[in-house]
Image (cartoon, rainbow, N blue to C red):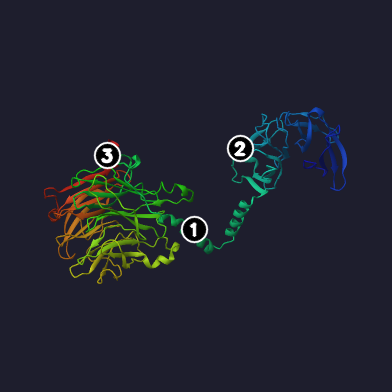
Amino acid sequence: MMGKPETLPSGERICPVANWREEESSSFYSTRDGFSFVRIGGTGYPRNLRCYDEHQVVRLADGTLKTFARLGSWKAPVNIGEAVSRDGGRTWTKGMPGRIPHTSSRFFVTRLNTGNLLLVKHGPIGSLLNDRRDLTAYVSHDGGETWKGGLLLDARKWASYPDGQQLADGRILVVYDFDRTGAKEICFAEFTEADVLAGRDVSGKVRLRRRISGIVPPQIKSIESRAAAYARMTPDERRAMWNRTMRAAAEFELMPPQLQTNVLERYTHAKLDFAMNCGVARTPKGRLWAVWVGGEDGPKSFVVGCWSDDGGRTWTDTRLVVDSHRASSDWDLLHVNLCHQVANVWCSPDGRLRFFVYQSAGIFSGRGGTWEFVCENPDDAHPRWSEPRYMFPGGCHNKPIVLRDGTWIYFNDYEPYGRENFPELEPFMGCGIYATRDGNILERRGFTRPEGTWHWAEHMAVERSDGTLWMLLRTGKGLMESFSKDKGFTWTTPAPPHALRTCVARFVFLRLASGRLLFVKNGTAVDVVPESREKLSAFLSDDEGVTWQGPLVLDARTEVAYPDAFQFPDGAIGLTYDRCRRTDAEILFARFTEDDVRAGEIRTPGSFLRSVVVSARAAQKN
């Protein structure tokens, strides 16, 4: 008996029993108690069309019983057999192939709660698919004369032998086997009559290809056991596991980044559509180097650079690239992007050009790290760069400074984002200071922390006339300051400065060769917070920051930000910044003097503003 009994209104149950060797191969037995059975009738099909029969019986709306039977063979499939009885199964019409083409395999028919019929078979309702795949459900409103809808339950080959039932709430459950000799799976599908008629999930209750049992390879069983173990974890245990996974993925960031000088086309100015300024520097022979972030201010960021041999009036196309995304393609499935979101360039007192690049797994893994490339011949047509050297965790947004005693001071911006991944590095997080005499051996001195107001500190410091180090740092609450009286080993708690204000953005804070202080910020008033990143302006102080002169407005437009500066041997100031980094994607250069700042306008011969280093809009025009 391959089909379910059909219960009549009288309580009698009609059971379809296959006797395919008998004349009436489709027999029907009656029972009321489930213990005693009486054969009441049957029908037969032509012997040359018979298969395993596997007939099923349903009661139609008018009380007629209708039976459907499997016919034919693999080589000669025949439409599903049909016969009817109008006397409760006692007598039947002669069984013959009906209207429904089907491969020689089991199907499933049942009466739904609505009185409509459900059919689950292989392939389209009106054509023969001589294969056990595309198990599909259909509905009939007219007792099986026509069929509508078509919800594909399983398209795989060897998904076959369906059976099922409808629950009181309308959900239909169908079970079937898949790949009996291979995967050996029993699967189920769950759906509603409305889903079948629509041919898609309209109820929100469709679940397909769910495995009930099967032969599970040990590799898969191992995965399932681990998944079960994770399901039993507490939230704290899951968080700990997540931290361990992130920590392991972050090991990729310790692979040295590669600097490319054979620049591919995709890094040329004409192809770049994002620009966030990093830094600018001058070599002893006069070449200017500019570096900036391309790609995006996010995990897809990379660093590019170019140079100028005419004092910043014109610039070459891209001359160097650091982009580890291509190297990380092997682990893209882990969604690990080695991004380079911070960089700068500096000509140290020994005449070498030093290029600092931050590398992190993702925007911030909780550690990241700054790497240094050194160039011995930065003025040559083909500069040669050293292999990268790991310096310290965290970034290096701004240039080092040189104290009066010859000490080089590096500014290490190691923010506490992701600190749970590397709790042992907590003591090193903050606005840190590293020191060296020659760039080789670094000494970590001290740090300060703007607790609760972190926002990419991008700190800079100057040495005051009394030897005190005065640090300015960016926070989520605006500009703050901190002081050190012992060359950077200890620092005061950050607090708002007395007279300096700016928006949440990068700034420039330098001691010039004249002894004056240079402060570059957004806004035309040194003690007022501007509404946005607009009106990039320069100010000077000749009394250690008590009062300020200026401003010289370097660029009055909006979305001008992230300045970085150096000083020419003649005292002029060179500065780069970005404008509209996501649209025009411009890096611009300005040359000006202290006299220009005091005058509030360009007066010095040789000074100029808004020289284009790179521009996505200019590239589009060309």
Of circles 1 and 3, the one toward us is 1
Q: Which residue is label 1 attached to?
A: 245
Q: Quadrant of the N terminus?
A: top right
Q: Quadrant of the C terminus?
A: top left
Q: Position of residue 336 (x, y in %)?
A: 45, 51
Foreground of the two, 416 or 98: 416
Q: Which image quarter: residue 520?
A: bottom left
Secondary element at image label 1? helix
Q: Residue at x 57, y 59 (%)?
A: 230
Q: Position of residue 178 (x, y in %)?
A: 67, 42
Q: Which residue is label 2 attached to?
A: 199
Q: Is residue 325 visible?
A: yes
Q: Is residue 402 left or right of residue 83?
A: left
Q: Which residue is label 3 attached to?
A: 618
N-term-proximal mark, 1 vs 2: 2
- Mark 3: amino acid: Ala
Q: Which image quarter: residue 309?
A: top left
Compared to residue 16, the image places residue 513 above or below, namely below
Foreground of the two, 78 or 305: 305
